[in-house]
Amino acid sequence: MFREWPEDRLAALFEERCREIIPPDRIAAEKAAFRWSKVAKPLGSLGALEDDIIRIAGMIGSPAVRIDKKALVIFCSDNGVVEEGVTQAGQDVTAAVTSNFTRGDSCACLMAEKAGADVFPVDIGVACEIGETGEAHPLTERKIRKGTSNFVKEPAMTGREVLLAVLAGIDIVRELKDKGYQIIATGEMGIGNTTTSSAVASVLLGADPAEVTGRGAGLSSEGLERKILAIRKGIGLHRPDPENGLDILAKVGGFDLAGLAGVFLGGAIYHIPVVIDGFISAAAAAAAAAIRKTAADYMLAAHVSAEPAGRRMLGFLGKKPAIDAGMCLGEGTGAVALFPLLDMTLAVYEKMCTFSDMEIEEYKPL
């Protein structure tokens, strides 16, 4: 719809969409919390999972929480910064794995199938030809161009491109909401995207790149040093504004991160919970929160990534994860792992008898 629009018109549309973001329904959340207080079990004994149901009630504006129809959206894109030797894999891997997603032949797809989630791979900037695709999960075409620029030399994206990518993410949420999906997990695939995510995290946290940068898919010590140096150079050259999520994404981010940021904003616009996966997803979520702070109120944290800044990014967002299992696979695997836990928790919320039903005294907060 908007892919041919000029930048000023895209910016106006983006602001129009973001003006629709309002805080979650406090009364609905309070009703869900009240329901939990009556369930015949120790108070708060399901921890973060219990809190998630309360927060979902606020997001959707009703204590009658339903998450029967689930989606996993995986943004696939390449990053120009790989020219700096920040990864041991080539960009052809992005295309190959994207093709695998369409055939259901990936870790995330297999886990999503078990979790009862439909998978939506999105090409938002894959550099190489994807080749033959499968029919299990048709590829959604939202390509901005074939990979971002190398942010060590120039901004990763133009102002127009970052708006296109974020609006694509928002639009995908609208489409999924119209199809009846009730919760969305976020995933990504893109060689070099732990570098872009570390750059985004460094800016948002005001931290030196060495503090927030890990080995990704398995860099050597020399490779890690190149990665840190590239991030430091990119931030020093472009000086992204830490208060401006769009500026950060455009200068040192990636198309996948910008698309994911759009999904997080879309969750807030269309009142649908969006699940943060690991470090890369959290970096995109944090950028979305830097664009509109209230967007964070529509996010759920699945797990703590094993990446160095994984826990710090969740802290930045004020999120309590349900899973701490040392995961760092990406693709949305951690996000879909939360779905069965939420289903089990919701069964207790909906079906467990109350203290009154059992004619026993309620637990009292101490």
Image (cartoon, helix red, strand yellow):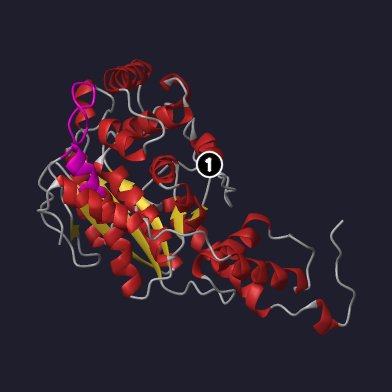
- Occupied quadrant, residue 111: bottom left
Residue density around tag 1, few if under 14, some if 14–19, many if 20 or more, within 10 Å? many
Q: Position of residue 162 (x, y in %)?
A: 23, 43
Helix, strand or loop for disc 1: helix
Residue at x-position 56% and y-position 68%: 57
Taking the image as shown, residue 128 lies to the left or right of residue 336, namely left
Residue at x-position 33% and y-position 49%: 260
**Residue 25 visible within the image:** yes
Q: Is residue 155 magenta?
A: yes
> Could you tell me what secondary structure mostly forms the magenta stretch?
loop
What quarter of the picture does the N terminus occupy? bottom left
Marks counted in the figure total: 1
Residue at x-position 53% and y-position 48%: 303
The residue nearer to you, when weighing 274 against 118, is 274
The residue nearer to you, when weighing 267 against 324, is 267
Q: Position of residue 270 (x, y in %)?
A: 39, 65
What quarter of the picture does the C terminus occupy? bottom right
Q: Which residues are magenta?
A: 147-165
Q: Position of residue 308 (x, y in %)?
A: 49, 30
**Residue 97 visible within the image:** no
Q: Is residue 177 magenta?
A: no
Q: Is residue 37 above or below residue 313?
A: below
- Occupied quadrant, residue 212: top left
Q: Which residue is mark 1?
A: 314
Taking the image as shown, residue 292 lies to the left or right of residue 56, namely left
Q: Amino acid at mark 1?
A: Leu
